[in-house]
Image (spheres, rainbow, N blue to C red):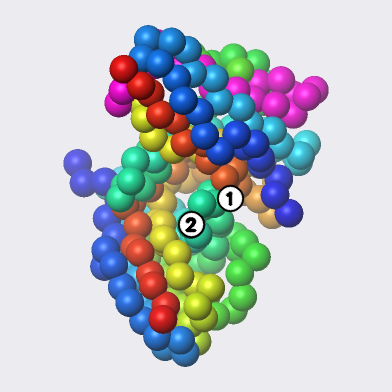
Amino acid sequence: DQQVKQNSPSLSVQEGRISILNCDYTNSMFDYFLWYKKYPAEGPTFLISISSIKDKNEDGRFTVFLNKSAKHLSLHIVPSQPGDSAVYFCAASAETTDSWGKLQFGAGTQVVVTP
Amino acid sequence: DAGVTQSPTHLIKTRGQQVTLRCSPKSGHDTVSWYQQALGQGPQFIFQYYEEEERQRGNFPDRFSGHQFPNYSSELNVNALLLGDSALYLCASSLVTSGQVYNEQFFGPGTRLTVL
């Protein structure tokens, strides 16, 4: 049962342009969302997060938007840089007794930033 | 400041064997979670240890077991290995304070397990 979905397995974007990564979820109990970036041969690195009480969180070039009614979130990277080429994972968690501290991940989106 | 470390980096086993993977959490962290990442998929939660006890478990069979030591390091054990257990095994650490777990989990580089 895939509760977090990233429907775009890959994204190619030109350097300097905006990258938009999308993520959908089905579990209405999710109340915290995170984005991780993963380079080959490394573990995922935490990028940015957002609580369900907010609809936007910004950190430098990275902004995450949350639309709770649509159960959708997106990550915007502006401007995109070659070092941003990586796999990006969306993750979600719920502060319920049986989900406390458990992250559910999407399948990831491979981003390639071209010069 | 050392991040999350895992050993070994790579491991090759045959079906039916048993394997133990090790993880040391980031300095100051007290909670360790284990994830399995199959090729082309996102990490799947196996279980989480806090205060030397298993606190949460994902949909993995009893062949997967773990342990947390007083210094917060952790082991993942898999018995009776199957071909389908071939994956990258990730350890993540986080901090619990005042009963709240910080959702930002910090991951190690993983152990690549190949079962032949």
Q: Are marks 1 and 2 on the same chain?
A: no
Left or right side of B106 for A109? right
Number of residues whose C-alpha sits closer than 10 Å to that of mark 2, classed few (under 14), some (14–19) or many (20 or more) = few
Q: Which quadrant would the N terminus of chain A be assigned to in this image?
A: bottom right
Residue A46: image location, x then y, percent: 41, 35
Task: Find residue A74 and report its horizontal and vertical position in percent.
Answer: 60, 23
- Location of mark 1 (residue): A102
Rendered view: B39 above or below A77: below
Q: Kindly identify the residue that appears in the image at 51 percent across and 52 percent down.
A: B40
Q: Chain of mark 1?
A: A
- Amino acid type, mark 1: Lys
Which mark identifies residue A7?
none
State how far apart marks 1 and 2 are (Cα).
Answer: 21 Å
Specify whether A82 is left or right of A26: left
Residue B95 in sight: no
Magenta stretch holds residue A20: no
Outermost residue toward the left? B1
Q: In the picture, residue A60 is in which quadrant?
A: top left
Which SS class for mark 2?
loop
> Quarter-wise, where is residue B11 in the image?
bottom left
Please count the marks in the image. Answer: 2
Where does the C terminus of chain A fall, quadrant-wise?
top left
Residue ID at (53%, 73%) = B84
Q: Is residue A78 magenta?
A: yes
Mark 1 or 2: in front is 2
* Span colored in magenta: A66-83
Which is more toward the observer, B2 or B42?
B42
**In this picture, is A35 found above or below A67?**
below
Query: Which residue lies most toward the bottom here?
Result: B16
Which residue bears the numbered disc 2?
A: B39
Camera-nearest residue between A36 and A86: A86
Residue drawn at (46%, 86%), measured in percent from left and top? B15
